[in-house]
Image (tube, rainbow, N blue to C red):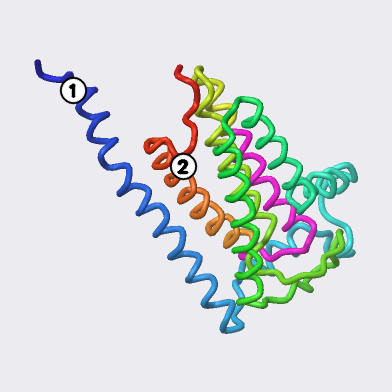
């Protein structure tokens, strides 16, 4: 019996998935390398200074645009991307997986989080870009700037957690919700760093690119390990 057209299309799409993943990772890394090469040469991007200044009042650069509550919200929100915030989120997600008896998956997730943090630290040390001095910082920072650790680590952790947890959901609306929350957290944390003046926009863009590429690689590895039963697949739907 000939398979219906939709089934054939789905099968063909499934066969192309490794190629799609490769293209996505390659494109992200290509743009990242382009940004990084400019940073290593000491070059700046026109939008870096422009956007940081656009988010402040021209007569007082220490005052960001928007209502006073927005500044407080951004300061609070950015905490979800620091070491403490991401560690707590990872522990909570790993705890959920342990409660669901997916012990090896919990260990895999923890290893991915630690690996992403290490990679971010290595990249910062390699590029050694100082923090922006275009506008006053609204939160205290001490380490280097490129790529943004908040953007990179949030992409690694929130996207990886979202993809793993969504596979346990039986309802596509629930899956889309989990994916949406992961993307919102990743995007929002990067934006908060620009708004607070502690990162250039190019730092955040580079962090998103590197983090998304790493999360995609981790997700592909997780699927492969699931098929080989080296980590536990989600319960049958």
User: Which residue shows up at 54% across the image and 73% down it?
Assistant: 36
Q: CA distance from mark 1 to mark 2?
A: 30 Å
Whether residue 203 is situated above or below residue 155 in the rendered picture? below
Whether residue 199 is situated above or below residue 189 in the rendered picture? below
Which residue in the structure is indicated by mark 2? 222
Question: Does dot 2 land on a helix, a strand or a loop?
Answer: helix
User: Which residue shows up at 59% across the image and 80% down it?
Assistant: 43
Residue 93: horizontal and vertical position, in percent? 66, 35
Q: Could you say which is closer to the camera, residue 55 or residue 151? A: 151
Q: Quadrant of the N terminus?
A: top left
Q: Which is in the foreground here, disc 1 or disc 2?
A: 2
Drawn side of residue 126 relative to residue 150, left or right: left
User: Which residue shows up at 88% across the image and 46% down it?
Assistant: 72
Residue 172: horizontal and vertical position, in percent? 49, 21
Q: Could you say which is closer to the camera, residue 130 or residue 14? A: 14
Which residue in the structure is indicated by mark 1? 5
- Is 194 colored magenta in this rendering? yes
| The magenta segment | 180-203
- Answer with the quarter of the image where residue 180 lies: top right
Kindly identify which numbered label has been placed on residue 146. Answer: none
- Answer with the quarter of the image where residue 100 lies: top right
Report the predominant secondary structure element of the magenta stretch. Answer: helix
Q: Quadrant of the C terminus?
A: top left
Question: Does dot 1 land on a helix, a strand or a loop?
Answer: helix
How many neighbours does mark 2 have within 10 angstroms: few (below 14), some (14-19), or many (20 or more)?
many
Q: Earlier in the sequence, mark 1 or mark 2?
A: 1
Whether residues under marks 1 and 2 lie with C-beta atoms below 8 angstroms apart, the answer is no
Whether residue 127 is situated above or below residue 203 in the rendered picture? below
Residue 40: horizontal and vertical position, in percent? 57, 80
Residue 178: horizontal and vertical position, in percent? 59, 30
In the rendered image, the residue lying farthest to the left is: 1
- Is 185 colored magenta in this rendering? yes
């Amino acid at each position: 019996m000939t398979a219906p057209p939709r089934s054939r299309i789905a099968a063909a799409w499934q066969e192309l998935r490794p190629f799609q993943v490769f293209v996505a990772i390659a494109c992200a890394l290509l743009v990242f390398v382009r940004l990084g090469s400019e940073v290593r040469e000491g070059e700046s991007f026109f939008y870096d200074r422009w956007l940081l200044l656009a988010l402040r009042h021209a007569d007082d650069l220490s005052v960001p645009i928007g209502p006073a509550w927005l500044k407080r919200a951004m300061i609070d929100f950015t905490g979800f991307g620091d070491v403490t915030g991401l560690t707590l989120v990872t522990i909570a997600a790993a705890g959920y997986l342990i409660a669901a008896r997916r012990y090896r998956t919990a260990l895999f997730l923890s290893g991915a989080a630690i690996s992403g943090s290490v990679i971010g630290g290595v990249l910062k040390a390699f590029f050694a870009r100082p923090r922006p001095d275009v506008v006053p910082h609204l939160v205290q920072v001490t380490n280097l700037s490129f790529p943004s650790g908040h953007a990179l680590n949030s992409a690694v952790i929130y996207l990886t957690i979202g993809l793993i947890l969504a596979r346990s959901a039986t309802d596509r609306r629930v899956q889309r919700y989990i994916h949406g929350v992961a993307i919102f957290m990743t995007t929002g944390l990067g934006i908060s760093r620009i708004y607070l003046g502690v990162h250039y926009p190019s730092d955040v863009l580079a962090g998103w690119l590197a983090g998304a590429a790493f999360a995609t690689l981790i997700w592909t590895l997780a699927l492969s390990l699931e098929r080989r039963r080296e980590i536990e697949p989600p319960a049958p739907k």
